[in-house]
Image: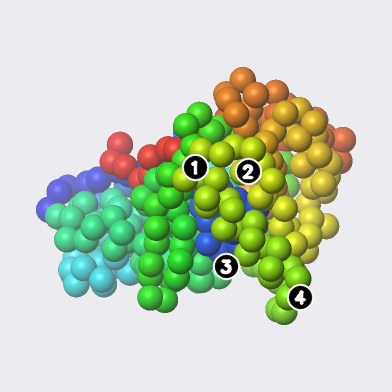
Amino acid sequence: MMGDVTAFAPATVANLGLGFDVLGLALAGIGDTVTARLAPGTGVRMVRITGDNGALPMEAERNTAGIAAIATLRKADVRVGVELELMKGLPLGSGLGSSAASAAAAAFAVNLLVGSPLRKADLILPCVEAEEAVSGRHADNAAPALLGGLVLVRSVDPLDVVRLPVPEGLTLAVVTPVFELATRKSRAVLPKEVPLTSHVSNTANLAALVSAFYSNDLALLARCLPDAIVTPARAGLIPGCMDVIDSALEAGALASSISGSGPSMFAFCRSVRSASDVGMAMVAAFQRAGLEASAVISAGDCPGVRRV
Ligand code: HSE
């Protein structure tokens, strides 16, 4: 066992438009950091949280980093005392997988701390347990935050995830407005039943999107993001949502939609240069809706959680 371990887990874009709860992709650069340290006794204690403006609970049982750490130790069947320090790099309620990033960094750090009894993929369910406690039982942020790249969650119970290839050069512009939207709230507006026509349209688009990822067919990818079910239900929760999408497309994006449960929005672009133009157009659209916003440009295929 080690004395202490620090791990970083990236932000993630879940859903990717129409893959509600089944698609997620890791971003570059931004994320949360957790230090795990062995401590006397048994159990997990949060000793410090920074970067959250005091918004997150210090009780390990109520914090996604703490819940994931507890679940990881339980799964590994290891009884030790652990102290956690969480450094939030991601804004809360932003649609960037903030709760999953904290959980993934904590699960990974704790697993390393106790000698790596579990594989990265074994840490997904402990992180899903944490997600369930704060928003809902979904793995489309936790899986890419841990594994990196683009991940398809075929099933959570039992867990079955598939890594998908990312077309060469595919770049994302991700724009985050200064506006908090709790995942729980944006899940509450979703319909419980969907018309068969919407199901058919989404199934066709999701299948074609996966095909586009495998075949590097960006023209096909550009046609696949329309979502007949989740995006229309959530658009009204995000000021400027449709204008942000239209502005991204006008600025040259392949496709654009809500990132996770919002309010962040993302666009798929052909290059870093295009993504810079698109990001600026999306920021301007949010400003027209009265919200300040900032853009991040990221490669499409980025690493997941790692030791730092
Ligand atoms: N798939 C989840 C949702 C992601 O859209 O509610 C939450 O970040």
Residue 134 in view here: no
Q: Residues within 10 Å of mark 4 (few under 14, many from 20)?
A: few
Q: Nearer the viewer, residue 92 or 259?
A: 259
1 or 2: tag closer to the N-terminus: 1
Q: Residue at x 44, y 38 (%)?
A: 301
- Eyeballing the image, is 134 above or below 217? below
Q: Report which residue position mark 2 lands on.
A: 220
Q: Which residue type does callout 4 highlight? A: Pro
Q: Which mark is residue 195?
A: 4
Residue 245: image location, x then y, percent: 77, 42
Circle 4/circle 1 CB separation < 8 Å:
no
Tell whether circle 3 marks a residue whose Cβ is less than 8 angstroms from ligand 1: yes
Pair 4/3: label in front: 4
- Which residue is depicted at the point 51% across and 38% down? 216
CA distance separating discs 4 and 1: 30 Å
The answer to whether mark 3 and mark 2 are in CB contact below 8 A is: no
Which residue sits at x=67%, y=36%? 254
Relative height, residue 219 to residue 184 (above, below): above
Give how far apart the Cα atoms at labels 1 and 2 are. 9 Å
Does residue 126 appear anywhere in the picture?
yes
Q: Is mark 1 within 8 Å of ligand 1?
A: no
Say which label, 4 or 2, has the lower sequence index. Answer: 4
Horizontally, residue 73 falls left or right of residue 115, namely right
The mark lying in front, picked from 3 and 1, is: 1
Cα separation between marks 3 and 1: 34 Å
- Left or right of 279: which side holds 84? left
Label 3 crowding class (10 Å Cα cut-off): few <14, some 14-19, many 20+? Answer: some
Amino acid at circle 3: Ser
Q: Which residue is denoted by mark 3 in the rendering?
A: 135
Disc 2: residue Cβ within 8 A of ligand 1's nearest atom: no
Q: Quadrant of the C terminus?
A: top left
